[in-house]
Amino acid sequence: MRVLVVEDEKKLGELLGRGLREEGYATDVADQGEDALWMARAVPYDAIVLDVMLPRVDGFEVCVQLRGAGIWTPVLMLTARDAVEDRVSGLDVGADDYLTKPFAFEELLARLRALTRRTAVERPPVLTVGDLRLDPGSHRAWRGETEVDLSTKEFALLELFMRRPGIALTRTQLLDGAWDMAFESRSNVVDVYVRYLREKIDRRFGCDSIETVRGVGYRLRTEA
Ligand code: CA
């Protein structure tokens, strides 16, 4: 899952970015509305955490412009005050949910999960492909009855495969989906992590579910 955080308070932006990365979200942080607009157009984010109070182009305006451009990425707005007008305006311009500052990080996580689940019908709480199971909420994965211990990046990669079983995914798609912008120049990082993932979900179980598609990338077989 890839998330964009838009927050002009440097410390809070960094804190959210770090916290979300630790939870396995590939996270980019923008500190102004103008940047958020081009980033949201360029990258298929799964969700945007958008502060209302931004200099120049504020959160409401960002939301209006995104929706106007046909970009329907779920938006969670951060409102500084517990003002009814702010929340109503946010929902009116196309935000999906809001959170009042200050908030508990756990609540932000729970709302992000709810948001990405409810806005996309193809996102059931637990993903199943063959005898692989993955639960994005609890960050757990299983091969058959055996729980597999995955790092956050391995987990993010497996989640991407399991959301598109049987489809060849390019290295760029995998990179875009599981890594934030800081990693975009390192294309071999995908191959490295696919190797780790194969070791954990396949080799140990005598399976061969992640297939190399020559000249394209990788595909998760629908049959184990
Ligand atoms: Ca702000």
Image: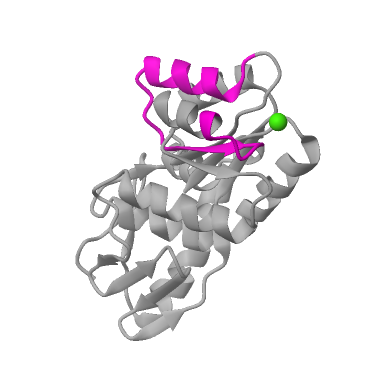
Asked if residue 149 is among those painted magenta in the image, a careful observer would answer no
Q: Is residue 43 visible?
A: no
Q: Residue at x 35, y 54 (%)?
A: 161
Q: Is residue 210 visible?
A: yes
Q: Residue at x 44, y 55 (%)?
A: 113
Quarter of the rendering containing residue 44: top left
Range shown magenta = 57-85
Q: Nearer the viewer, residue 95 or 131?
A: 95
Query: What count of labels does the image hold?
Result: 0
The residue furthest left is 223
- In the rendered image, residue 31, in percent from the top left (x then y), is placed at 70, 28
- In the rendered image, residue 57, in percent from the top left (x then y), is placed at 62, 15
- Quadrant for the C terminus, please: bottom left
Q: Residue at x 52, y 70 (%)?
A: 150
- In the rendered image, residue 99, in percent from the top left (x then y), is placed at 55, 45
Q: Nearer the viewer, residue 26 or 11?
A: 11
- In the rendered image, residue 146, in percent from the top left (x then y), is placed at 38, 85
The residue furthest front is 84
Q: Nearer the viewer, residue 158 or 119?
A: 119
The answer to whether 30 appears left or right of 206 in the picture is right
